[in-house]
Amino acid sequence: MIDPIIKSVTVPLTPQEAFDLFLSDMDKWWPNESHSVSGSKNHRPKLVIEPFKSGKILELGTDGTQHIWGTILGWDDGEYVSFTWHPGRSADEATVVSIQFSAVKEGCKVNLTHGGFDILGPQADAISTSYLTGWDMVLGCYSRSAVSQIAFA
C-alpha cells in the first residue's frame, strides 16, 4: 500500500477566502500551461469547478475540448473539499484529494491529502512520486496568488 501524500501551506487569508481562491478562482493561479491535459506555452485551458457535491472539475480547451479531472465527493463551504482526481486518465483510475481549510494566527492553514494511488497498479509508485513535487509546485503557485491578493487589496 502506498502512503498518501500530505502537504500543507499557510496563506494570509481567512479560511473562506482561501477556500474560494483554491476552488472558485482555481483558474487564476493553477499552472495550466504545464499542469493540465491540453495546456502548453501557447494554449492555456480554462479550469472550472462545479461548486457542489457530485460537481465536476473540468478543463476546457480553447478548441472546445473538455477533460474531466475529477468529481466532488464532499463540499463544506469554507472548510473542506474532497474530490476524485484523474487528469488525463479514466475515472476508473481516480485517486482522491481532500483539502481542509483551518484558521490559524497567520491566516489559514491549508492541509492537502492525496491518496488512493494503489488503484493505479504497477504505475502507482511512479505517479505518487511525481505528485510529491507536483503538489509542492502547485501549492507554491496557490500561495503566491494568495499573497498577491493581499498586496493588491
Image (spheres, helix red, strand yellow):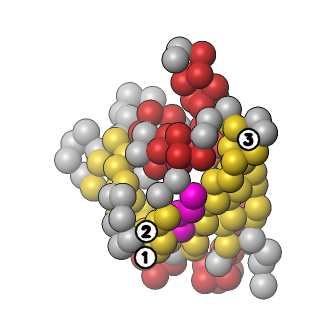
Question: Which of pointers 2 and 3 lies earlier in the amino acid sequence?
Answer: 3
Residue 74: image location, x then y, percent: 48, 71
For the residue carrying disc 1, how many other residues have a C-alpha within 10 Å: few (<14), some (14-19), or many (20+)? some
Q: Nearer the viewer, residue 115 or 19?
A: 19
Q: Is residue 151 left or right of residue 50?
A: right
* Magenta-tinted stretch: 79-83
For the residue carrying disc 2, how many other residues have a C-alpha within 10 Å: few (<14), some (14-19), or many (20+)? many
Is disc 1 placed on a helix, strand or loop?
Answer: helix
Q: Which mark is residue 72?
A: 2
Can you tell which of label 1 and label 3 is closer to the viewer?
Answer: 3
Q: Pointers 1 and 2 in contact (CB under 8 A)?
A: no
Residue 101: image location, x then y, percent: 63, 54
Can the viewer see residue 86?
A: no
Residue at 77% from the left image edge and 78% from the top image edge? 2
Give the CA distance from mark 1 to mark 2. Answer: 12 Å
Which quadrant of the view contains residue 114? bottom right
Q: Is residue 117 left or right of residue 38?
A: right
**Quick one: quadrant of the N terminus?**
bottom right
Residue matched to label 3: 10
Is disc 3 placed on a helix, strand or loop?
Answer: strand
Residue at 45% from the left image edge and 29% from the top image edge? 41
Q: Amino acid at mark 1?
A: Ala
> Magenta stretch: dominant SS?
strand
For the residue carrying disc 3, how many other residues have a C-alpha within 10 Å: few (<14), some (14-19), or many (20+)? many
Q: Amino acid at mark 3?
A: Thr
Is disc 2 placed on a helix, strand or loop?
Answer: strand
Residue at 60% from the left image edge and 46% from the top image edge? 15
Residue at 51% from the left image edge and 78% from the top image edge? 93
Q: Pointers 2 and 3 in contact (CB under 8 A)?
A: no
Residue 146: image location, x then y, percent: 59, 31
Q: Which mark is residue 91?
A: 1
Is 81 a magenta residue? Answer: yes
